[in-house]
Amino acid sequence: MNLLADDSNELVPLKPKLPAAAFVGTPKDIPPGSIIEPSVDKSKPPLRIPKDAVNIAPSAQITTSDANAKPDALRKITDGIKEADDANLVLLRKGVQYIQFDFGSPQQIFALVIWHAYDTPKVYHGVVVQLADDAGFTKNVRTIFNNDAANADGRGAGTDHEYFESFEGKTINAKGENARYVRLYTKGSTDGSFNEYTEVEIYGRPMK
């Protein structure tokens, strides 16, 4: 029996620390023509990730397509404070906008958990998540989530469903892809034209 066997690939449930719910019940005001996922699906088991994968987002450099956004404001996206208060919210300009994470070196990425603003029932449009090997997103670009059926972001038409924001955030399976850069796109919501983030967690580990 090899007592020193590598157990780093042992999988454990992803259970991020959740903030308090901002509203009670299931949203019923579904936008016409939309296919919306249930806001809370208790029957779905949590995503499982390697036990040594941790939230690497706080160590990343964050930039954005919104030239008006200040670095101090962007740091709120990874400060661990997820409550649905205006003070915790990062507001980006109207239209298609993205935030980008640079880890400094390639990482093996297993999951993202994204909280846009969830103070009221709302659905964000054009939610696209991509990985790449370069900052300009021209090398080895991979799309791991895309609910932009109308291709409003210009990243290609997606087939994932839109969803109501909630205190649970949106978990996206990155399947252990290797990448140095992560981009998250949106184009407004059912509540307005601005783009909003409360918190983003990215679970990964250094490439082996």
Image (spheres, rainbow, N blue to C red):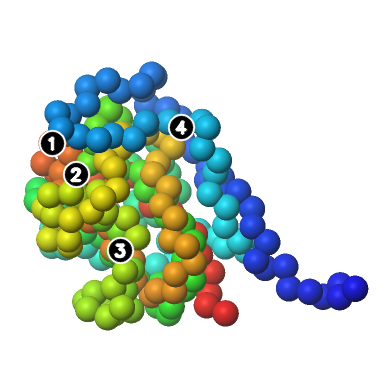
Amino acid type, residue under disc 2 in the picture:
His
Front: mark 3 or 1: 3
Q: Give the residue displayed 60% in from the left and 48% down from the top.
A: 13
| Label 1 residue SS | loop
Image position of 206 (left or right of 79): right
Image position of 20 (left or right of 1): left
Q: Which mark is residue 143?
A: 3
Quadrant of the rendered image containing residue 146? bottom left
Above or below for 200 versus 17: below
| Label 3 residue SS | strand
Depth check: give the residue in front, 162 or 96.
162
Q: Which residue is mark 2?
A: 125
Quadrant of the rendered image containing residue 190? top left
Name which of mark 2 and mark 3 comes first in the sequence.
Answer: 2
Residue 71: x and y in percent read 26, 61
Front: mark 1 or 4: 4
The reply to whether the C-beta atoms of the residues labelled 2 and 3 are less than 8 Å apart is no
Question: Farthest right residue?
Answer: 1
Residue 109: x and y in percent read 47, 66
Depth check: give the residue in front, 22 or 48.
48
Name which of mark 1 and mark 4 comes first in the sequence.
Answer: 4
Name which of mark 2 and mark 1 comes first in the sequence.
Answer: 2
What is the crowding at mark 3: few (fewer than 14 residues within 10 Å), some, or many (at least 20)?
Answer: some
Q: Which mark is residue 192?
A: 1
Above or below for 128 versus 206: above
